Image: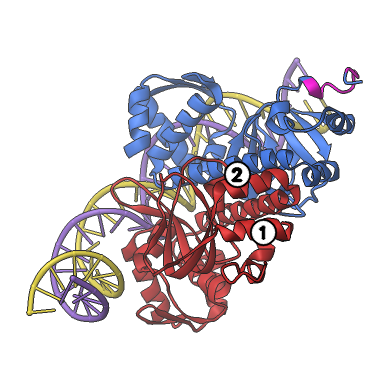
Chain colours: A blue, B red, C yellow, D purple
Amino acid sequence: MLDNPKCNCENCELKSLFFDHVAPEDLFDICEIKYETSHIKGDVIIKEGEKINEFIYLKEGLVKLSKASSNNKDQIISFSKPFDFVSLLSVFSSEKYNYTVTAVEDSVTCLLDLDVVKRQAQSNSMFTMDLMIRVSEVSDKIIQENLEIKRKHLKGRVAHVLLYFSKHIYNDTTFELPISRREIAEYIGMTTENVIRTLSEFRKDKIIKIFGKYIEIEDIKRLENISEFG
Amino acid sequence: MLDNPKCNCENCELKSLFFDHVAPEDLFDICEIKYETSHIKGDVIIKEGEKINEFIYLKEGLVKLSKASSNNKDQIISFSKPFDFVSLLSVFSSEKYNYTVTAVEDSVTCLLDLDVVKRQAQSNSMFTMDLMIRVSEVSDKIIQENLEIKRKHLKGRVAHVLLYFSKHIYNDTTFELPISRREIAEYIGMTTENVIRTLSEFRKDKIIKIFGKYIEIEDIKRLENISEFG
DNA sequence: CGCGGCTTTGATGTTCATCAAGTAAAGTGG
DNA sequence: CCACTTTACTTGATGAACATCAAAGCCGCG
């Protein structure tokens, strides 16, 4: 029964994140109703204000969490890859999504009916405990990251973002920036022009190399120094 | 048994927040080991870095949640009164407290042994669900509040803080500011001098009256306008 | 009483946003 | 596939917003 070709949740690498403490037969029920969706870069996965009907989690890719502000300016709250999941945020405290989630790389999400998940949560305390720990971790990360950025100036913030993608997302000193200069600006709360100026300055100072969206960190020590004290 | 004079949790006005779904006998066990503590204004209730041994919640008063930054500057993350509880944040995702909690008004906290609470959480899914909803709400509030502040300029931020205390904390257009000008600055990410200048400006423009820590909002419409667009 | 922290105001300089203008890249419809 | 349009990127010049420095009065507390 668990070999049902439609249901490969047993082998899902994310299973242990949420479903370690769910009985196989319950997992099968959940799995039966799941819905996997592919999104290409730029796709809006969740729109703020929409009613929450599903429990959504990210299987592959990279997404941004944002909120529309006045005069069509967005604020980017955080980025998430699989394993540090985001749609958790509103799911248990609100009827509607408070934030928009957009794919910044091609992504795959898995949708579960929220009522089924809630039912499971109400009857299976170990599962609920797992969820709560996740919710707590995700929130904590966002709050801490925002504090970090807040206490820095322009250069420190740009350096911070570069190091964030290098260390936390790509594990490489060379990577393709998945977002535009404007999105960096929306994330760190500065203007696009000043983000560009700062990147150019880092280039002139031989701290990074820039080829369009491709970034190569040449002098990570100095970048870390700027992030910390600049 | 539930009339045990040492155990008045049955009548605690916070009971329904966390303990609606806890069986009376379990509640009694939890209650037996509880520890109520009074703190005067300025007392540090939780220090960042300390090991988390208790589940702490605020019964009375007002506290601030902060984090020490470099060169002895603090960043204030949020304020909490009873019912929107804060120590929840780290409790389930970390071994140690990530933030410092300080009383900004005389406060009373109730401490429960964390293991006992965790044991309850692991066996009582409705209780865990209640907790999770709380964690989710608290985090969401903090994130949203920080976004609001971030998108505003100096004047808008100061106006925002005044309205925050007026509307969310005191429900009155006249109130005593529980925090110093410096703490306002630490909360909104500006300098003390500029906070003071802005308050003085509001006074000159007859938007507020200032008597030391006492604030009287004279023209709330304009203050709201400044908060929104200033 | 005097010391340290909080508050206040002014003068000055730095950081950053805004405006402008041009180039490159990427999507769009015929 | 090419002309067209839009969006992203880049640099410079200017001014506004804000931090920093300085100095003085105030208040509470040991």
Q: Considering only vertical position in the picture, is A9 above or below A155?
A: above
Do the residues indicated by labels 2 and 1 lie within the same chain of the protein? no
- In the picture of the structure, the residue carrying the numbered disc 2 is A136
- In the picture of the structure, the residue carrying the numbered disc 1 is B27
Q: Considering only vertical position in the picture, is B186 above or below B107?
A: above
Chain of the residue under the numbered disc 2 shown in the image: A
- Total marks placed: 2
Residue name at image x 74 percent, y 57 percent: B21
Residue A205 seen in the figure? no
Asked which quadrant contains residue B84, the reply is bottom right
Instruction: Return the x and y of residue B49 as percentages of the image width and height.
Output: 40, 44
Magenta region: A3-10
Chain of the residue under the numbered disc 1 shown in the image: B
Residue name at image x 73 percent, y 34 percent: A57
Numbered disc 2: secondary structure = helix
Instruction: Return the x and y of residue B142 as percentages of the image width and height.
Output: 56, 55
In this rendered view, identify the residue nearer to me: A194 or A145.
Answer: A145
Badge 1 crowding class, 10 Å Cα cut-off, few under 14, some 14 to 19, many 20 or more, is some
Instruction: Return the x and y of residue A119 as percentages of the image width and height.
Output: 83, 45
Residue name at image x 88 percent, y 17 percent: A3
Asked which quadrant contains residue B177, the reply is bottom left
Left or right for B127, reference A4: left
Residue name at image x 44 percent, y 35 percent: A160
